């Protein structure tokens, strides 16, 4: 199943799961031999029919939208965000996107850049629990989310995105993957420099939850085990973590494990049974099922694609 929205391209994602409230969550539809990023230019005047007003959804990847001209509006976690010329919108993993009412959707030409952290060498091995504090993702931090590119810099943004589109369209070129990663990094650096100086003070209990996940994710622990270790009920911690981060406790445990799985697949030749044992998963068969469900491919196919890229 494919989808389209203000913040993603039809060919970028596929349905991963549906939350208990009915919100679909889409995974990045990665293709073998290609970096996990995509960019395209869209025009709401011509593609507005692809944006059903009732289509609330979330992504398990990051999205950056740069508006070249026009105006409009969409919602992130129920809060309206304005689309205007020069604007940049950052949508984090798990945040719920909801188009505005039809009366508020105007003509708008923009770029949409979707990517997984693995696409950036500096982020590939960073724990997902720490990404919210990484300098390259400053615009994705809580309290940020949007900025405006100065007029003198807008042509540079267009060149970066145009060149990135060109590199991704020709993966057979020598160094295309490295060039794409460099261009994406340039965009993220520029976006981070525009991020508002909002102090990020994590909830002390959420910080303790993340510390406990970091210390135990290699073991077969559950959300209930983490809650018990901290002296709270699973329901209370799940609600707290979801309210603070937009994602439930179990999803963070899974995300941390899958980040380590990808690191081991990319950097070692360990068999799947050992990868599973080192990431708190039951066995190789369970690892394959979870990996395929999350990424739409098998661990070995993903490993080969990383080596070929």
Image (cartoon, helix red, strand yellow):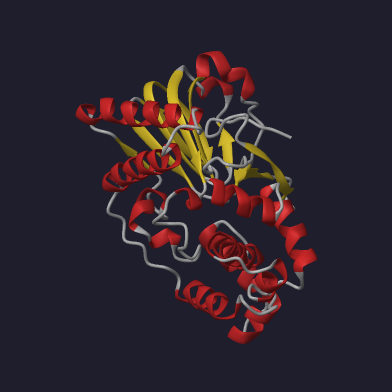
Q: Residue at x 60, y 47 (%)?
A: 305
* Rendered location of residue 303, percent (x, y): 61, 54
**113 sits left or right of 242 in the view:** left
Q: Residue at x 51, y 72 (%)?
A: 206
Q: Which quadrant of the structure image shows residue 255?
A: bottom right
* Rendered location of residue 195, percent (x, y): 31, 47
Q: Nearer the viewer, residue 154 or 307?
A: 307
Q: Is residue 251 placed above or below 18 in the rendered structure?
A: below
Q: Is residue 44 placed above or below 137 in the rendered structure?
A: above
* Residue at the extreme top: 46
* Residue at the extreme left: 152
* Residue at the extreme right: 285
**126 sits left or right of 54 in the view:** left
Q: Residue at x 37, y 28 (%)?
A: 163
**6 sits left or right of 181 in the view:** right
Q: Which quadrant of the structure image shows residue 15?
A: top right
Q: Is residue 227 placed above or below 290 in the rendered structure?
A: below
């Amino acid at each position: 199943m494919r989808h389209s929205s203000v913040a993603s391209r039809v060919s970028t994602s596929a349905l991963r799961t549906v939350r208990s409230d009915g919100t679909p969550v889409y995974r990045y539809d990665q293709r073998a031999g290609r970096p996990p990023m995509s960019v395209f230019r869209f025009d709401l005047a011509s593609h507005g029919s692809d944006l059903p007003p009732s289509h609330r959804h979330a992504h398990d990847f990051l999205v950056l939208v740069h508006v070249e001209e026009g105006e409009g509006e969409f919602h992130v976690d129920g809060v309206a965000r304005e689309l205007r010329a020069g604007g940049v919108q950052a949508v984090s993993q798990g945040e719920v996107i909801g188009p505005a009412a039809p009366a508020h959707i105007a003509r708008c030409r923009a770029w949409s850049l979707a990517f997984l952290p693995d696409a950036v060498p500096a982020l590939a091995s960073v724990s997902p629990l720490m990404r919210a504090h990484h300098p390259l993702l400053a615009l994705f931090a809580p309290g940020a989310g949007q900025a405006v590119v100065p007029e003198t810099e807008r042509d540079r943004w267009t060149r970066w995105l145009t060149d990135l589109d060109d590199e991704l369209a020709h993966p057979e070129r020598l160094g295309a993957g490295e060039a794409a990663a460099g261009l994406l990094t340039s965009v993220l650096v520029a976006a981070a420099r525009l991020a508002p100086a909002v102090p990020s003070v994590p909830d002390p209990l959420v910080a303790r939850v993340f510390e406990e996940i970091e210390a135990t994710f290699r073991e077969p622990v559950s959300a209930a085990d983490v809650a018990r270790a901290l002296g709270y009920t699973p329901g209370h911690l799940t609600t707290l973590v979801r309210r603070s981060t937009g994602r439930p406790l179990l999803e963070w445990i899974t995300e941390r494990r899958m980040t380590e799985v990808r690191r081991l697949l990319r950097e070692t030749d360990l068999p799947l049974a050992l990868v599973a044992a080192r990431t708190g998963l039951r066995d190789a068969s369970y690892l394959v099922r979870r990996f395929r469900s999350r990424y739409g491919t098998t661990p070995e196919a993903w490993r080969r694609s990383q080596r070929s890229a």
